[in-house]
Image: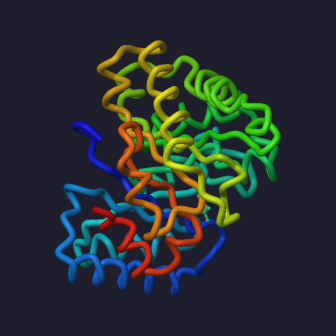
Amino acid sequence: AAGRTPLMAGNWKMNLDHLQATHLVQKLDWTLRDAKHDFGAVEVVVLPPFTALRSVQTLVEGDKLSLKYGAQDLAVQDSGAYTGDISGAFLAKLGCTYVVVGHSERREHHGESDELLNAKVKAAFRHGLIPILCCGEGLDVRKEGKQVEHVLAQIEADLKDIPQDQAKTIVIAYEPIWAIGTGEVATPEDAQEVCSAIREKLAELYDQETADAIRILYGGSVKSGNVAAIMAKEDVDGALVGGASLEAEEFAAIARYQ
Ligand code: PEP
């Protein structure tokens, strides 16, 4: 929507080893180049597992590819005795532009609280990474009609003490949990309702100019067949795509929704 560059991000989750990742990135790049994709007009981002990031970096830098990449999570701490964790400093060194923070699968399986996610947003900015901050309600909340207040409470807590100059660059992904990986996509109106409420909240927390600069993505069973209708909504500036990002032609078609 107005003045904001659309962003299509593929969240690979725990799929693809580093060889498969290289193959998919190559195929995605060929497909988009063949279609004369304007990467400046619609940004394309892949979010591989940590173990594939070095291979993706080598390919993107070596072949001067126009797509960008990022990680699916990061640690709050910068280094030290945190076995198994990955620092934002390492991700920055690997050329990551983005990092997902607060995906519903991490909130659910790893008990990530809004307080922790606020610290992760700060850690991302500390290392020059742009957080893709995820929010969204479960089916119980949706059934009660409380999706807007649920999501706004997450946003307010996750952005606590984030200064305006950083907030301006953040990406927010609204992902209703009942629509993730289920094949059940929210209607464009459902997506717009929550995305516009998020933007109003951002204007309240910062100012209108900041709110208007922030990209808000929709995520949840996005495919090439339903992306255009969702993207037509004023406050939807892109998509966070799970399953459909694992296939080059399908993800390229999503990026070329227009
Ligand atoms: C996701 O994991 O962020 C997601 C939206 O998954 P899917 O597109 O498969 O629903």
- At which x and y percent is residue 253? 36, 73
In this picture, residue 97 sits left or right of residue 187 = left
Q: Residue at x 50, y 20 (%)?
A: 201
9 horizontally vs 41: left or right: right
**Up-down relation of residue 153 to residue 95 (above or below):** above
The reply, left or right, for residue 188 in relation to residue 221 is left
- On the image, the x and y values in percent for residue 1 come to 30, 41
- Visible in this render: residue 95? no
Q: Is residue 145 left or right of residue 258?
A: right
Quarter containing ligand 1? Answer: bottom right
Percent across and percent down for residue 217 are 46, 46
- Visible residue check, residue 238: yes
Establish if 164 lies above or below 128.
above
Q: How many marks?
A: 0
Residue at 70% in and 64% down: 182
| Pick the front one: 186 or 150 | 186
Please report the residue visible at 30 percent of the width from the left and 82 percent of the height from the top: 31
Way the structure is coloured: rainbow
Determine which quarter of the picture holds residue 220: bottom right
Q: Nearer the viewer, residue 94 or 68?
A: 68
* Quarter-of-image position of residue 3: top left
> Could you tell me which quadrant the C terminus lies in?
bottom left
Residue 198, x across and y down, in percent? 51, 28
Say if 58 sits above or below 99 in the image.
below
At x 62% / y 54%, what residue is drawn? Answer: 86
